[in-house]
């Protein structure tokens, strides 16, 4: 299989399906929640709902690329598409690598209150900042350049 023939929107759709499958497999405990404390307010969301949200985001990004390439028949900037894809796919892979590595580490029985989830939280926050402030503007700029570009795809 030639890697140059794989379309970027297909990669985003594949990752969206993978996220849903991981969410279904990991949803063996319905009482698991994701909570964020901001000052005096807690935002609580079930893990499966956050999985659905992230999957829909990946699907919509793939749909944006598909609309520009197939419906408008315009070319995207290859470098911007590559950077955006590497940031999002790389953050997805990095999160799961750290998540499974952190899950495999044993909790010290002498000090059971110690939880080594700080590394996962640091990675999540840094990935969120990278996605929001770098990848999303790159995605929007790439789509706008593709839409308003005069050259069409062959």
Image (spheres, rainbow, N blue to C red):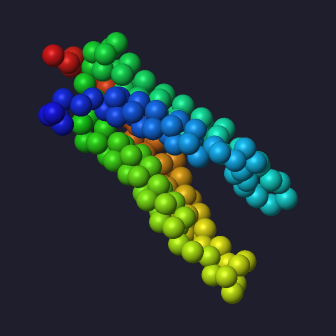
Task: Judge from the rendering whether residue 153 lies leftward or rightward of residue 147; answer left or right.
Answer: left
Is residue 145 at all visible to an observer of this figure?
Answer: no
The picture quadrant where one finds residue 108 is bottom right
Q: Nearer the viewer, residue 76 or 17?
A: 17
Residue at image coords 52%, 47%: 132
Residue at image coords 51%, 60%: 99
Q: Position of residue 122 (x, y in %)?
A: 55, 66
Task: Judge from the rendering whether residue 122 lies leftward or rightward of residue 136; answer left or right.
Answer: right
Q: Which residue extends farthest top?
A: 71
Q: Position of residue 133 (x, y in %)?
A: 49, 50
Measured along the vertical axis of the image, is residue 67 above or below residue 116?
above
Measured along the vertical axis of the image, is residue 35 above or below residue 52?
below
Q: Nearer the viewer, residue 105 or 130?
A: 105
Is residue 40 at all visible to an observer of this figure?
Answer: yes
Q: Nearer the viewer, residue 87 or 149?
A: 87
Residue at image coords 43%, 59%: 97
Q: Position of residue 124 (x, y in %)?
A: 55, 58
Q: Which image quarter holds the C terminus?
A: top left
Measured along the vertical axis of the image, is residue 3 above or below residue 104?
above
Measured along the vertical axis of the image, is residue 9 above or below residue 106?
above
Q: Which image quarter holds the N terminus?
A: top left
**Tally of numbered tags:** 0
Q: Nearer the viewer, residue 50 or 125?
A: 50
Residue at image coords 56%, 59%: 125
Q: Which residue extends farthest bottom?
A: 110
């Amino acid at each position: 299989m030639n890697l140059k023939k794989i379309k970027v929107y297909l990669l985003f759709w594949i990752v969206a399906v993978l996220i849903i499958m991981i969410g279904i497999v990991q949803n063996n405990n319905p009482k698991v929640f994701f909570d964020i404390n901001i000052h005096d307010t807690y935002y609580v969301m079930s893990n499966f709902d956050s999985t659905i949200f992230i999957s829909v985001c990946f699907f919509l990004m793939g749909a944006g690329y598909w609309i520009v390439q197939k419906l408008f028949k315009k070319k995207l900037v290859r470098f911007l598409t590559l950077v955006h894809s590497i940031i999002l796919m790389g953050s997805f892979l990095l999160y799961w690598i750290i998540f499974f590595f952190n899950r495999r580490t044993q909790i010290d029985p002498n000090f059971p209150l110690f939880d080594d989830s700080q590394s996962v939280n640091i990675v999540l926050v840094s990935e969120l900042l990278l996605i929001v402030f770098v990848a999303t503007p790159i995605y929007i700029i790439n789509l706008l350049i593709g839409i308003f570009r005069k050259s069409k795809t062959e």
